[in-house]
Amino acid sequence: MNIPKGENPVAIAISAALVDGFDKHYRLFRECSVAAKARFEAADWLGQQRAVRERIAFYDQRVRETVELLKNDFQADLLDENTWHQAKLLYIGLLTNHRQPELAETFFNSVFCKIMHRTYFHNDFIFFRPAVSTEYLESDPPAYRTYYPLRDGWREALARVVLDFGWKCDFADLARDVGYVAEEIARHLGDADPHPNCHIRVLHAAFYRNKAAYVCAMLVNGDQEHAFVVPVLHEDGGRLYLDAVLLDPRDIRTVFSLNRAYVMVDMEVPSAYVRFLRAMMPRKPEAELYTMLGLGKQGKTMFYRELAHHLRHSEDEFVVAPGIPGLVMLVFTLPSFPYVFKAIRDEIAPPKDTDREAVKAKYLLVKQHDRVGRMADTLEFSDVALPKARLSEALLAELRRTCPSILEEDATEVVIRHLYIERRMTPLNIYLDRATDEQIEHVVRDYGLAIRELAFANIFPGDMLMKNFGVTRIGRVVFYDYDEIEYLANCNFRRIPEAPNPELEMSGEVWYPIARNDVFPEEFATFLLGNPKVRAAFMRYHADLLEPEFWQATQRKTATGHVEDFFPYPDDVRFCNRPGREAAPARVRRAVSAA
């Protein structure tokens, strides 16, 4: 790409305005993330949830502001492709010493795509490929601190790790807790001798989510690296304690699952944090890590690059996803790619009473809410162009039949104007059809736990049919169909009144009035528990979910502003279950197993 001779003042002004717009966004984003530490110290859990929810909207607000500014100032020149050619090159120059260049490139793309037609969406005009390397980009102070347990002693080094975060709250018994951490690390290392290079790398800032702070670290010993995470919690009296040390890679991945709320963390150089987290979790895609850090647009950029790369190196076809078709969404998948693609149907048939905008509002609700490990996060895309030759005939026919208003075709591409993309799971109903008795027992118990934990988070799934839940690779049950989701507080849980006479009760006709948000938990068993083995397992663990009293009591609790404890790791790794440690309060003892 050649810069036109002479300086283009419009291109210069556009590139500067774009950098200013991004810098304003990241300054506000970082201020919100920095404040998470103070909210944690003050045990302001509702404030923490509100901040996570509000921060999601920051990016789109700054993009809209920048688009409006450019349209007001450069309307006559804004559609000139030569101006954008030069603006992109000038923008690259402005990012030479930038601390968040990859995010700034994505911001450029977002603004450009609001102004120009999609035929310009390629690397000549947008950053389809990154232009500025982040490989050795570092912050000041560095992204991680280093500690030397062989020089300072294990307990002293681990205590220093914790104290260097500078929390203003006292610890209940830090010496005891770091002793537990040291013992568990020693057990994990087994017979391995300490190597002269033995040291601990700890990310400079803690991660905040729900009611916990997470310390993320790597123990380097010789040529071996061991990731570990230490959750820090509040006691009822406000003092802090270390709840566990997570050394199992599965537990660490679960902590940072996208089925939970995004974390708050202060990062001057996000790429350095992602690089550190990739060392801790090599199987986690960069797209998921950026999204988990609250940088959803960057996550989408990374995902789309990954999809484009995969399509160039594969030959299978997109097909309609297996399972019972939904009334609201057309779901399809590429078998070689671990995601599903969901398009809202143009016409939503009864008994569903909703429309496209209402469905989009439900998906936004889930994105803004604490998903407590039980609701799948989604990537929302506009104008997704897929190669027409890669869509099966059956899928193409179904798209034309059910989603024509959001479909655009030419000879080589199919463009879907609005699409949700999420991690592929095995639908629970399909899983149960193939499951052993032991698997049925486990997954039905976890299905009930998922419903229960969503209720504690003020969420009622609405349609609790098993086809609307999925089973993850580690056997965890997650909800993913959101068109009937409601805040628990908005529901009216009732017991079915007695029939005035036996004839009415036997007739099958409803003899009592029903309002829109009325829910009758006694009916759940009829629709959900037809399989005798499923019913037996469910009744062993979750019979109370079939009674309105459970739901009403949970409503009263959430109405007080109570924020429940959700632990994204197994109960048996928590220090409160170790012999010799006084049991934590009942509020703290109740834990959710990550499996």
Image (cartoon, helix red, strand yellow):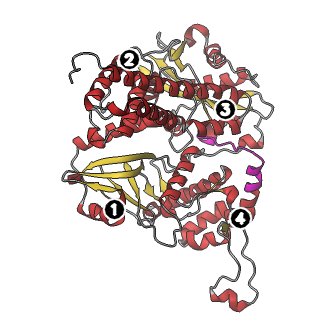
Q: Which residue is mark 1?
A: 404
Measure how far apart labels 2 and 4 are at the Cα level. 56 Å
Tell me which label, 1 or 2, sits earlier in the chain.
Answer: 2
Q: Residue furthest front?
A: 76
Q: Nearer the viewer, mark 2 or mark 4?
A: 2
Residue 352 picture location, percent across and down: 51, 68
Q: Residue furthest top?
A: 151
Residue under pointer 3: 243
For disc 3, the neighbor class at 10 Å (few under 14, some 14 to 19, many from 20) is many
Give the amino acid at mark 4.
Asn
Per the image, label 3 sits on a secondary structure element best described as loop
Foreground: 71 or 119? 71
Please tell me whether mark 3 or mark 1 is closer to you in this view: 1
Number of numbered discs overlaid on the protein picture: 4
For label 2, the residue is 94
Disc 4, SS: strand
